[in-house]
Image (cartoon, helix red, strand yellow):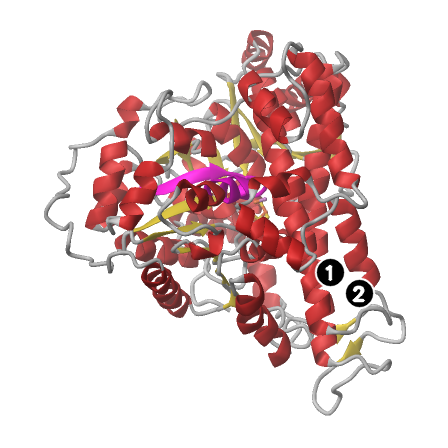
Amino acid sequence: MPDKKTIDPAVVEMLEKAKADGVLTMFDRAEATAPCPIGHPGNCCHVCFMGPCRLVGKTTVGLCGATKETVAARNLARAIAAGAAAHSDHGRDMALTLLAAAQGEALDYQIKDEKKLRKVARLLNVSEQERTKEEVAVDVALAALADFTSVKEEVAYVRRAPPKRQALWRRLDIAPRGVDREIVEVLHRTNMGTDQDAEHILTQAMRCALGDGWGGSMLATDISDILFGTPGPVAARSNFGILREDEVNIVVHGHEPTLSEMIVVAATDPELIEYAKSKGAKGINLVGICCTANEILMRQGVPVVGNFLSQELAIVTGAVDAMVVDIQCIMQGIVAAAEHYHTKIITTSPKAHITGATRIEFDEHRALEVAKEIVRAGIDNFPNRGGVYIPDYVDHLVAGFSHEYINYMQGGVYRESFRPLNDNVINGRIRGAAGVVGCNNARVTQDDVHLYIIKELIKNDVLVVTTGCNAIACAKQGLLTPEVMEFTGPGLREVCQTIGIPPVLHMGSCVDNSRILTVLAQCATEGGLGEDINNLPVAGFAPEWMSEKALSIGCYFVASGVTTWMGVGSPVAGSEEVQRIITEGWKEKIGAAYYFEPDPEKAVKEALAHIDAKRAALKLEEYSPTRYARSATYLPGDYAPFEVFAEGRYSRGG
Ligand code: CUV
């Protein structure tokens, strides 16, 4: 167990309140239950009913003779397939919503970003000229749906990768076909008595993960942008202090923007606001948790109450009138926590029921009506509140850095490009870049590892892009604001001040890790930094990962050429051979390694050495921490991008 549970002072206060109220949370359960010492490092095989076989002590093979290598590889591959399934099923639902919207069957949705629709159409080989946006959208949705199930053809977005990477994938026979097929093939091959060569199993795991990154997730992001708008910078707020004592607090939690976007509309409906007032509230306060929060934060500036480990504690405030959940990362424990308070847990997805929760099933064909029903249920619950305690912590942040905006911010409408970014990497102002993403994990101090790694990176002039619960950790600690310039190395600071951005760019939810792939592909083809993603001086991190989805993301980063450090511990620690395959072996094969490194200091050190080695291989100037020290002197107050960025339409000061 970590000595400290969290570095978030609001969470510390809420844990005290939970204790006083007799509520058990994940933090308590983590203390009570240690991880299984056999399964945790990947030494438990449960693919047949003669086991589970526990490969410990003198037992080195299962009943069937399966070795530790095979077992660890199978477990990892299956977890990656499950993670890919989660992202991709979300993506498929977005495509179905787009189809329904374009066919006039889901009247509450519109095509908000026609430019992106037409761009996506061209990428999917859908003809878009002289056709209405609805006609194009129908064919885009159908092409996307066909992509998910493609049996033989590789997915269309493989063509968005640098040509060299595409060629490598084809040579290794891992250019992904439809993600459905890749997932099924992982499950088949890891079924009892099928594929029993660790390296061969793990190669298929890469293909499956690529089907997630360049298939399901990328489509999820693109279609969300088409339906709800491509994000641009937006100022917003985070942490428990955004809950309001005198307003109806509705928390959306989960992943899909289809519902949460509608709840944004419902929560601003004048009739419902009047209704809230009739119940004694001053208004309706909509906030988010986890990735659905990131979706509506990126586009609407809706404030974020917390990340994964904060979900039960939001209920402990006694101020949450409804917690509306859809899919993924929703602890079953929220229902038990809610029993101590008045909070209504409302499940909405046809795919996810929770015993004991209230159920209001979402239907995209009458989306706004359902959203209003949900908000009304929250309002009706407001008078049932008991004691309320809201810790007074609010942080400010800027989010909304889509690939499109990053392109635009480097040259405006007519000269948008990645040239300035590449040039500043080449001249050494920016040492390199890192994607730092992923969950919270109750086995490590909440947000501590996230923050340590990001602060070290920006101090060393490494530009950071973030998504998921890492982004929320950064938001809560003020790292997505200009003040963070104090922690930033001089070269990186100069670039950020010139463009007007924080050194940590919030790029969205977990499926939006695909935005990072698009950025990397463009950096690699812009010129001056090699021709493939694995030539770039970049690194990936998931410091506090816990979800199978994080394993899929890490794996597609690596298979795309980004050496990645996963924190916490290793799910394959039980097999030296598997560890060798995914590090040294994959470095040879795919040009990047997949590390599991619980020591954050070691991970940062290795990543900086990796970035410098990539710089040297590109024959770039050697990075010097002091070269730009004088040209970028930060004067507090000098620079206030808050004034330039529009407040999110939902965001209010506070
Ligand atoms: Ni999809 S997957 S805990 S919400 S980042 Fe947060 Fe992000 Fe991990 Fe889940």
Helix, strand or loop for disc 2? loop
> Within the magenta stretch, is there residue 509?
yes
Image coords of residue 608 (percent x, y): 34, 62
Which amino acid, mark 2?
Thr
Tell me the magenta residue range: 502-519
Residue shown at 71%/72% (left/top)? 198
Q: Which badge, 1 or 2, comes first in the chain's sequence?
A: 1
Which of 226 and 129 lies nearest the eye of the viewer?
129
Query: Tags 1 and 2 in contact by the CB under 8 Å rule?
Result: yes
Mark 1 — residue?
Answer: 78
Residue shown at 51%/62% (left/top)? 592
Which amino acid, mark 1?
Arg
> Within the magenta stretch, is there residue 342?
no
Label 1 and label 2: CA atoms lie apart by: 7 Å
How many other residues sit within 10 Å of disc 2, few (<14), some (14-19) or many (≥20)?
A: many
Which of 21 and 287 lies nearest the eye of the viewer?
287
User: To which quarter of the image does residue 95 belong?
Assistant: top right
Whether residue 649 sits left or right of residue 87 in the image: it is left
Mark 2 — residue?
Answer: 190
Which of 573 and 367 lies nearest the eye of the viewer?
573
